[in-house]
Every structure is written in C-alpha cells, then in structure tokens.
C-alpha cells in the first residue's frame, strides 16, 4: 500500500490528530491484508514542522521512501474517536475537553 498524499491543516498538527488519521489508515490496511505501507516525505519549508512524523510513528527509511511493517503494533493515545459517514470525503475535527472527535463525511 502506498500513501500518496497525507495532507492536514496546520491547525491540527501536533494535536495527535495526524497520528489518529494514520492509525485509522494502518488499521484499515491490516483488515485488508496489507503487509507494508510505503510513504514519501518531500521536505519543504511548509512541512518542516512535521518532518519527524513518519519516523516517530515507526516508519523506517529506505532510500527516498519510508516503510511501515503492519506486523508492528501502531499505538495512539486514547483521546481520539472517529465518527464515519461514507457520503463525502471531507474531514473535520472538533475538540471536546481532552477528547478529539474526527468526523469523516
């Protein structure tokens, strides 16, 4: 499996929402029998704040790409809850105290 684009608002970066989204992708990939996820990080000034995201999530660099083995347990803090609705593909987030809810429409 290849993650082609992982684009999130700078307003949510660093609030664990990005890990929650990646965790959701990892879980869906596991359910589908995928063994490895491949991603590429293309450095720029705009995405500098997130340059350690992939290695911090357990991805290993090999050449120009980052790889994540789905044999590895992906863990995120228990502060995210996903509410899914497959009608649209827009993603919104809102905060409630210590719990963050991600609405996928």
Image: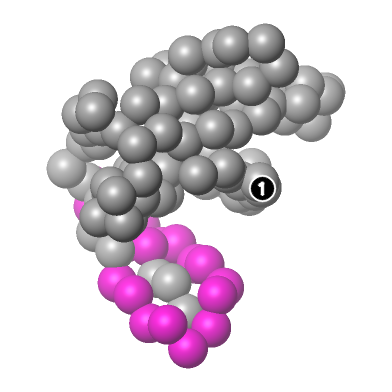
Q: Position of residue 6 (x, y in %)?
A: 61, 46
The reply to whether residue 96 is in sight is no
Q: Is residue 96 magenta?
A: yes
**Pointer 1 local density, CA inside 10 Å: few below 14, some 14–19, many at least 20:** few
Determine whether the residue tagged by mark 1 lies in a helix, strand or loop.
loop
Question: Residue under circle 1?
Answer: 5
Based on the displayed image, in which of its 4 quarters is residue 23 positioned? top left
Q: Residue at x 40, y 70 (%)?
A: 103
Based on the displayed image, in which of its 4 quarters is residue 81 positioned? bottom left
Closer to us: 87 or 28: 28
Q: Position of residue 104 (x, y in %)?
A: 43, 72
The magenta segment is: 83-102
Q: Residue at x 53, y 83 (%)?
A: 88
**Colour style of the rendered protein structure:** one colour
Based on the displayed image, in which of its 4 quarters is residue 15 positioned? top left
> In the image, is residue 28 above or below residue 15?
below
């Amino acid at each position: 499996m290849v993650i082609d684009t992982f684009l999130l608002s700078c307003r949510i970066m660093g609030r664990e929402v990005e890990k929650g989204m990646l965790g959701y992708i990892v879980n869906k990939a596991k359910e589908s029998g995928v063994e490895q996820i491949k991603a590429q990080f293309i450095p720029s000034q705009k995405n500098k704040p997130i340059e350690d995201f992939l290695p911090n999530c357990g991805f290993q660099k090999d050449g120009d790409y980052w790889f994540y083995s789905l044999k590895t347990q992906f863990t995120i803090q228990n502060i995210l809850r996903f509410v899914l609705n497959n009608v649209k593909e827009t993603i919104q987030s809102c905060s409630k105290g210590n719990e963050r809810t991600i609405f996928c429409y």
